[in-house]
Amino acid sequence: MPSIKDIKVETYQQQFLKDLYLAIETRVKERARNGGKTSKFRNSYKGAEVSHLTHTWNRTNSSGDTEARGGLRLLRAGARERARNDDYGKKFLRMDVINVLGAHGIIFQSRVKQKSGKELDSAANERIEKDFNDWGKRKNFPEVTGKLSWRGIQRAVRKTLTRDGEALIRKIDGFKNKYRFALQLLEADHLDETYNTILPNGNEIRMGVELDEWKRPVNYWLLVKHPGDFSFPHNAGSFKRIAIPASEIIHVYDPDRINDTRGIPAMHASLFTMRMLGGYEEAELISARTGAIKSAYYKSLDGDPAVGKEEIEDGNYVTEATPGALDVLPEGYELTPLEWNHPAGNFPPFVKQILRRMASGLGVSYNSLAGDLEKVNYSSIRSGTLEERDSWKEEQRTFIEDFNDPVFDGWLQMWLLKPDNSYSIMDFDRLDQPKWIARTWDWVDPLKDMKANTEGLAAGLMTRTEIFAERGKDFEEQVEIMAEEKKILEAAGLSFDSTKPANNITDDDVKGDPEEIEEEEIAEEETTVPARSNGKNRGLA
């Protein structure tokens, strides 16, 4: 009989059973060596014990790609369904896009310096910013279909990334627009996760991505047609794949493990909870609506049939309740009301607890996801907001590095090849100095925040550039606006004093209204529901 160690496995379940049997075999041998007793120190880690309480725990050490391969398509479909039909799924997706991109998207600013490296090259910066912003207008086709502007492209990619776990963007050099450069947005379905093979040259194709010996992407094998499109089965060559060089593809995803080849939807950990909660709330809603009708039925006291009533079952007859109307009780019958005690008294706290669990899986605070600020005081909302905003900032930086920077690099290369350009491709490294200004947030108490900025500026601990950047604005642009305002005011005979408001902020102004302070102090003493966040904010997927 072959040893358990020699048994080959092909599935997760077989691997798990093999690990379980090996653990049991080891334990049996250990007991035999100790005279039928199990060693007291057989395992140093409680989480590694195998018992009747843990035998259903799936603890296989498979690679990230192995774990994703079998469930990626279902996870993606499940996340899309929740984003369509679930209130909280749709809210999470919108939260992610709004907090990462804001109303204006991530704004481009050029920070090219002179060849000496000491001063900014104002002429180069002005021209690059002007042309890049012009390219981003929808009329100039920054996206091949002409449906999206640069801001719209960012929103579409971010939404796709969060919902599907990954987004594919193909850079089209030589496209027929003013700047000879455009983007083609592709859904992850084009990258077939079932396509896995070893090529004659030694490269490996993993879930549609061709990798070299260093696991570096070489080609992306894309399906020509979307496999889920209604016309897909009727198109000739629907299952045809083409190899697109990795240099043309921007594959945006957040790897969960070091060597992950594909991305997982951000909602993956909460999909089950989200669906169960949605079904539970739907059942409670239907029960409450049914109970509000106040239905009733007649029950025969002597078993005789009622004249003029439609018999339903066992001599009982049903009547419909009409709002504002009374029915005559037939002789020999009693009226039995149907009681629907829903929603039950524990419904609100139960839903709140499940929402907290769901919010942790999604990486956002409960208060933001549920829109629940009841019994939340200043201290708790401040703590939760700070942590959550740090998570959004981390998401912004990752998105800029994975998407915005590669797009600008591709645009700059084609821009330098324009015949009327005074710069050449040799200037690429010097001109490749993008600065992306992401959205920021107003503080809970803007007056205190303004006073802190004023004092930091006076002490030399902050710069105006930093202050404007924190608010998502370009310092140089604001200076130009203020200079233009000054001209208009002076032309109208009005004064312009930009320092007066900052110097007139007093401690009394910061303290605020005494009645509001008293209400806040009272609220702090009450039992509160703290804002919750799990730190790492997924939106990404």
Image (cartoon, rainbow, N blue to C red):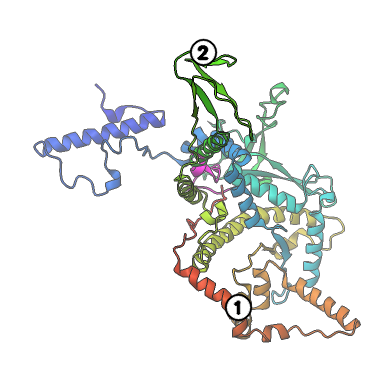
Give the residue furthest to the front.
331
Q: Amino acid at mark 1?
A: Asp
Instruction: Identify the secondary structure beneath mark 2.
Output: loop
Tell me which segment is drawn in magenta.
Answer: 251-272
Residue in the foreground of this view, choosing between 523 and 185 = 523
Are the residues tagged 2 and 1 within 8 Å (C-beta)? no
Q: Residue at x 47, y 55 (%)?
A: 534
Q: Report the predominant secondary structure element of the magenta stretch.
A: loop
Identify whether 111 is placed above or below 461.
above
Residue in the foreground of this view, choosing between 508 and 201 = 508
Instruction: Identify the secondary structure beneath mark 1.
Output: loop
Report if residue 447 is visible in the image: yes
- Residue corresponding to mark 2: 305
- Residue corresponding to mark 1: 513
| Residue 322 location (% of width, % of height) | 63, 31
Q: Residue at x 52, y 64 (%)?
A: 381
| Residue 452 location (% of width, % of height) | 59, 79
Q: Which mark is nearer the camera, 2 or 1? A: 2
| Residue 454 location (% of width, % of height) | 63, 81
Report if residue 205 is visible in the image: no
Q: Residue at x 81, y 53 (%)?
A: 137
Q: Amino acid at mark 2?
A: Pro
The magenta stretch spans residue 257: yes
The residues bearing labels 2 and 1 have C-alpha atoms spaced at a distance of 74 Å
Identify whether 143 is placed above or below 36.
below
Q: Residues within 10 Å of mark 2 (few under 14, many from 20)?
A: some
